[in-house]
Amino acid sequence: MLTPFAITKENQLHSGMVYINPGQEFAGKPATSFPLYIRIKSYIYTCGLAEEVPLEKVGMNKKMRELLRVTLGERIEIELYEGPGDPYLG
């Protein structure tokens, strides 16, 4: 579970991505492989790495927080999304 963090860099505000610290782990594994996708509630987001986002936080813009109906102090469930797999390989 992570806490939302207000991103402020102009290039991040309009990217449509969420951001985590490069040292953040998911299920005991570092979040270093790309592309990285995470699920927050029923939404899937592309996730970037940003040093300015503190550990245990997820950087998102105001519109994302409004869509998800989360506040900056709220802890939210976030999980790594690995997709349904290759539809041709099963």
Image (cartoon, rainbow, N blue to C red):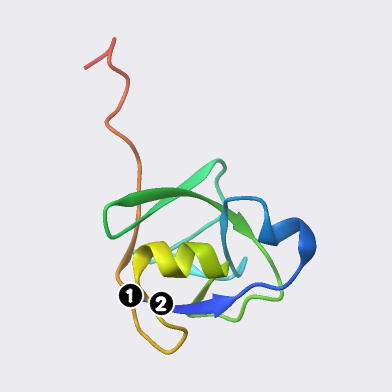
Where residue 65 appears, x then y in whole percent? Answer: 45, 69
Q: Name the residue at the top extreme.
A: 88
Which residue is nearer to you in this view: 73 or 51? 73
Q: Do the residues labelled 1 and 2 touch (CB within 8 Å)?
A: yes
Where residue 3 appears, x then y in whole percent? Answer: 43, 81
The secondary structure type at the circle numbered 1 is: loop
> In the image, is residue 43 above or below residue 30?
above
> In the image, is residue 59 above or below residue 14?
below
Distance from disc 1 to disc 2, alpha carbons, whole Å, reads 6 Å
Q: Name the residue at the bottom extreme.
A: 73
Where residue 59 appears, x then y in whole percent? Answer: 57, 70
> In the image, is residue 60 above or below residue 11?
below
To which residue does mark 1 refer?
76
Residue at (71% x, 76% y) in the render: 52
Where residue 41 appears, x then y in whole percent? Answer: 28, 60
To which residue does mark 2 refer?
2
Of marks 1 and 2, which one's residue comes earlier in the chain? Answer: 2
Q: Quadrant of the N terminus?
A: bottom left
